[in-house]
Image (cartoon, grey):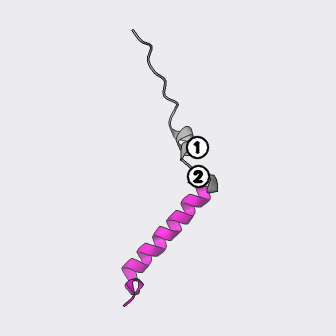
Amino acid sequence: MSILKNEVSRFFALGFAGGAALVMATMGLGGLGDGSDLARGLVPQAEAAAAQ
């Protein structure tokens, strides 16, 4: 018995693959690295407070 014979699991697998393809198309293949490009766009660089 195949796991993809059930319609729910088949649609879940297709939705997951389609969503992953959309994310890859949006981020580009450069987004597969360490994620620094994505973080650089969302989070400002941290700065330490001055010592007192």
| Among the two numbered marks 1 and 2 on one chain, the one whose residue lies closer to the N terminus | 2
Q: Is residue 17 left or right of residue 12?
A: right
Badge 1 vs badge 2, beta-carbon distance below 8 Å: yes
Spot occupied by residue 38 in the image (x, y as percentages of width and height): 55, 45
Q: Could you say where residue 12 lies in the image, as x and y percent from the top left?
A: 41, 73
Residue 19: in magenta span: yes
The three-letter code of the residue at mark 1 reads Asp
Q: Is residue 21 above or below residue 43?
A: below
Instruction: Report the residue at 50% width, 36% height from top.
Output: 43
Near-viewer residue (15 or 1): 1
**Vertical placement of residue 5 versus 12, above or below:** below
Task: Assign the C terminus to one quadrant of the image.
Answer: top left
In this picture, is 50 found above or below 21?
above
* Main SS, magenta residues: helix
Q: Residues within 10 Å of mark 2 (few under 14, many from 20)?
A: some
Q: Which mark is residue 31?
A: 2
Query: How packed is label 1: few (under 14 Cα within 10 Å), some, or many (20 or more)?
Result: few
Q: What numbered label is drawn on residue 19?
A: none
Give the side of residue 34 with respect to residue 50, left or right.
Answer: right
The alpha-carbon separation of the residues under discs 1 and 2 comes to: 7 Å
| Local SS, label 1 | helix
**Residues in magenta, as a range:** 1-26
Between 52 and 17, the one nearer to me in the picture: 52
Q: Examine the rendered structure and indicate whether residue 8 appears above or below residue 38.
A: below
Residue 19 position in % (x across, y down): 50, 65
Q: Does the stretch in magenta take in 16?
A: yes
Q: Residue at the top extreme?
A: 52
Q: Which residue is mark 1?
A: 37
Q: How many numbered discs, if any?
A: 2
Residue type beneath disc 2 = Gly
Quick one: 52 or 41, which is closer to the camera? 52
Residue at 58% in and 52% down: 31
